[in-house]
Image (cartoon, rainbow, N blue to C red):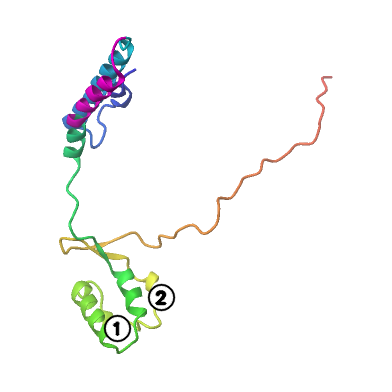
Amino acid sequence: MSIANKLKVPDLCGAGSSFDSVLGEVDNLSNQALNQIDGAIDAEASDIIDSISASLTPLANSITGMLPPLPDVPNINMQAELKALNNLTVGSAQYIEKLATIKTQFGSTIDLDSLDLANVDICSLDNISLSSGGEALTQAKDVVLATAGEAKDTLASLDNFTISVG
C-alpha cells in the first residue's frame, strides 16, 4: 500500500492539495527508486544514488514550500525576563534598565509596580509571551516538567482456586 493511501483520510484537518501533491511525489520517488534498484544488475550504484538524489531536490523544495517562514526574532517570555531581573542586584543600573525594558514590553498586560518582585512567585504569574510581531500572548498556565520517572502499575494477583461443577 502506498504512503498516499495510508495517509489519505477524508476531511483531514490541515490537509490540502499541496499535502496530497507531496504524498504523490513521495510515492512516485519510492516506486522509481525501487524500480532502479530492481533492475540494477548492470548499473553502477553511484549512478542509482545520483538519480535518486536528483529526484529528491524537487521533493525537498515542495516540503519546505509548505512550511511557514520562521520569525527572525524569538518570542520574549515575561516569566523568564522577571527571573532574569531577580538575578540582578536591586537598584543597580542593570536592574533599573531591565525593569524599564520589561515595563515597556509587558506594561499593558501587567502592572509591575504593584508587585513585590523580590518576593512574588514568578511562576504563579500569567505566562505571557511577546511575539516577534509585538503581540502579547497568554500561554498555558502551570506547565511543569516531570521530575520523576513514570509510575508503574502492578496487576493484582489471584490465589489458586478451583471450580467445581456439581
**At which x and y percent is residue 146?**
49, 57
Task: Tally the marks.
Answer: 2
The amino acid type of the residue labelled 1 equals: Ser
Q: Residue at x 30, y 10 (%)?
A: 42
In this orientation, does residue 131 appear? yes
Of tags 1 and 2, the one toward the viewer is: 2
- Provide residue 108's location: percent of width, then percent of height: 19, 73
Check residue 114 in the rendering and tell me which mark sits there, or answer none.
Answer: 1
Q: Is residue 62 left or right of residue 120?
A: left
34 w.r.t. 19: above or below:
above
Compared to 40, does 152 lie above or below? below
Q: State the residue in front, 131 or 30.
A: 30
Residues drawn in magenta: 42-58
Sequence-earlier tag: 1 or 2 = 1
Where is residue 38 drawn, in percent x and y?
A: 33, 12
Residue 121 numbered mark, or none? 2
Among the 4 quarters of the image, the one containing residue 118: bottom left
Looking at the rendered image, the quarter that the N terminus falls into is top left
Residue density around tag 2, few if under 14, some if 14–19, many if 20 or more, within 10 Å: few
Mark 1 secondary-structure assignment: helix
Helix, strand or loop: magenta stretch: helix
Q: Could you say which quadrant of the image residue 53 lies in?
A: top left
Q: Residue 130, percent across and down?
A: 22, 64
Q: Any magenta on residue 55?
A: yes
Q: Residue furthest bottom?
A: 91
Report, in whole angstroms, how far the alpha carbon at label 1 lies from the one at label 2.
14 Å
> Which of the 4 image quarters holds residue 158?
top right
Q: Are marks 1 and 2 in contact (CB under 8 Å)?
A: no
